[in-house]
Amino acid sequence: MLPISIPSFTTKRIFLAVTSNLHIYKNNELIFYYSITHFIKDPISIHQSDILKISDHIGYLLTDNFSCYGIVNSNEYKFVIGPTKQVSSTASNLLELAIQLDIPKEDIDEFIIAMQEIKHIPFENLMQIADTK
C-alpha cells in the first residue's frame, strides 16, 4: 500500500500490470519510485524534463534508443511506467546510455546488466495499461 492518497481508478491497472519502473509525481515532484531492477542511476533522468511536459491524459515518450515510457496524468498526479523496451538493446547502445548518464567506469557492467533485465512490454500493451477507462 502506498503511503499517499492517489486516484484508485488509476492505481487499479497500473499496480497490477507494472513489471518495470514506476514513478509517481505530484505537481511534477517525485513522490514515489518503485523498480524491479536496481539502477546505479535511474535512466529516466535523461528524459525527465520531456516526460514532465506531457500533459495529455494518456501519453508516451519513445526515446532515441527505443526505450518507452507510458504516462498517465490524473489531476495533479503523473504516473510514469518505464523505461520498457520495444526492441533489445545492443551492448554498444547501453554503453552509450551509461556514458550519457555519467555512470562511473567501474559500474558500467552492472548498469548494462540491469538495463538488460528490463521487461519488454509491447507498445500496445503499455498503452492498455495506461488507458484507465
Image (cartoon, grey):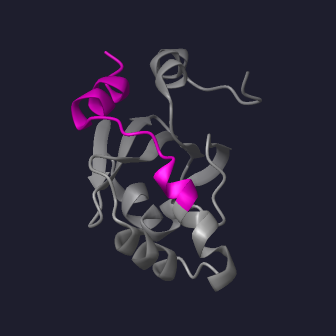
Residue 93 screen position, x and y as percent: 35, 71
Left or right: 2 in relation to 119: right
Q: Is residue 26 left or right of residue 57?
A: right
- Residue 4 in the image, given as x and y percentages of width and height: 72, 30
Image quarter where the C terminus lies is top left
Residue at 77% x, 29% y: name it. Answer: 3
- Magenta region: which residues? 113-133
Q: Is residue 15 magenta?
A: no
Q: Quadrant of residue 107?
A: bottom right
Residue at the outermost left position: 124
- Residue 42 in percent (x, y) is at 58, 61
Residue 123 in percent (x, y) is at 25, 37
Q: Nearer the viewer, residue 13 or 103?
A: 103
Q: Residue at 42% across / 65% down in the picture?
A: 47
Q: Residue at x 34, y 59 (%)?
A: 89
Residue 84 lies, with reference to residue 96, above or below; the image says: above
